[in-house]
Amino acid sequence: MEVIVTPDAESMGWVATRLIADLVRRKPRCALGLATGSTPLRTYRQLIQLHREEGLDFSQVVTFNLDEYYPITPDHPQSYRYFMNENFFKHINIPLTPRDGNRRWGNTYVPDGTAEDVEAHCLWYEERIKEEGGIDLQLLGVGSNGHIAFNEPTSSLGSRTRLKTLTQKTIEDNARFFDNDMSKVPKHAITMGIGTILDARVIVLQANGEKKADAIARAIEGPITSMCPASALQLHPEVYFVIDEAAASKLKYRDYYDHVQELKKHLRAPRVEG
């Protein structure tokens, strides 16, 4: 586990961007696990910049998103499919032709918020990840209650992709995307499980702002517990916590993490197979 504290959110984004770009260059047919929300937006904008200015090639990359509200249509402005298309996929050269209904668009997978048989769809999603040989690098954010993807507190640490009921706290946090009207926020989501996430070869978690400080401290330095799903990342052999100063403000071992990074001449790149 590496804890990388950056001076601000923009530089935080560039750490994840460089890790992803290095992977794409070294393994063109890689599988990326992607997240939504305001935190990864910086990284997506920076990857778009590298695509336009340096020709970073996404033509063979396959992506799997962590989650999607349920029920919701892909053209809804707050659906995660809409978010990914508008903020990332449409601006790079990744194949994006819809197929299989809402289940797959080109090389991009986002859980289908209109699935009639949700259980079957979740099994299908897991199988697609396996067919690609697993996820090479998983990008994550963290909720203020410690959730990763939509794995709320009390989620099984071995859980797989499934339908999950959202907590009132998550609904309150996400109401800002729905005109600050909690009644408009979907009460469920299809989400990769914690076990699914831990299967990724490399995990990069980003967090910024004081509101995430408690969750980050519990995830990095607290006990491994289902009450803080992000704490399960302590079990992973190669995870990067990339956070800004505010998110790092409650870490007890902050000086040590800085010392470790000072001794590294170059940020170690993720392992890539084949």
Image: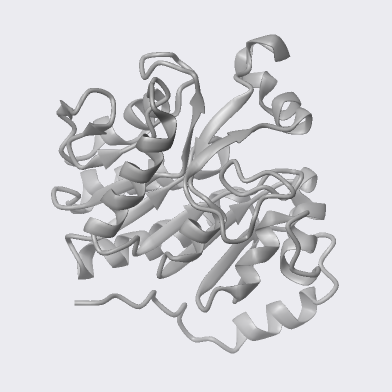
Residue 143 in which image quadrant: top right
Image position of 36 with respect to 196: above or below: above
Q: Is residue 233 visible?
A: yes
Q: Residue at x 44, y 48 (%)?
A: 43
The quadrant in which the C terminus is found is bottom left
Image position of 249 with respect to 260: above or below: above
Q: Residue at x 29, y 59 (%)?
A: 130
Q: Is residue 246 visible?
A: no
Q: Position of residue 18 (x, y in %)?
A: 39, 62
Q: Position of residue 219 (x, y in %)?
A: 72, 62
Q: Position of residue 202 (x, y in %)?
A: 44, 68
The quadrant in which the N terminus is found is bottom right
Q: Residue at x 75, y 82 (%)?
A: 256
Q: Is residue 124 left or right of residue 248?
A: left
Q: Residue at x 74, y 54 (%)?
A: 247
* Coloring basis for residues: one colour
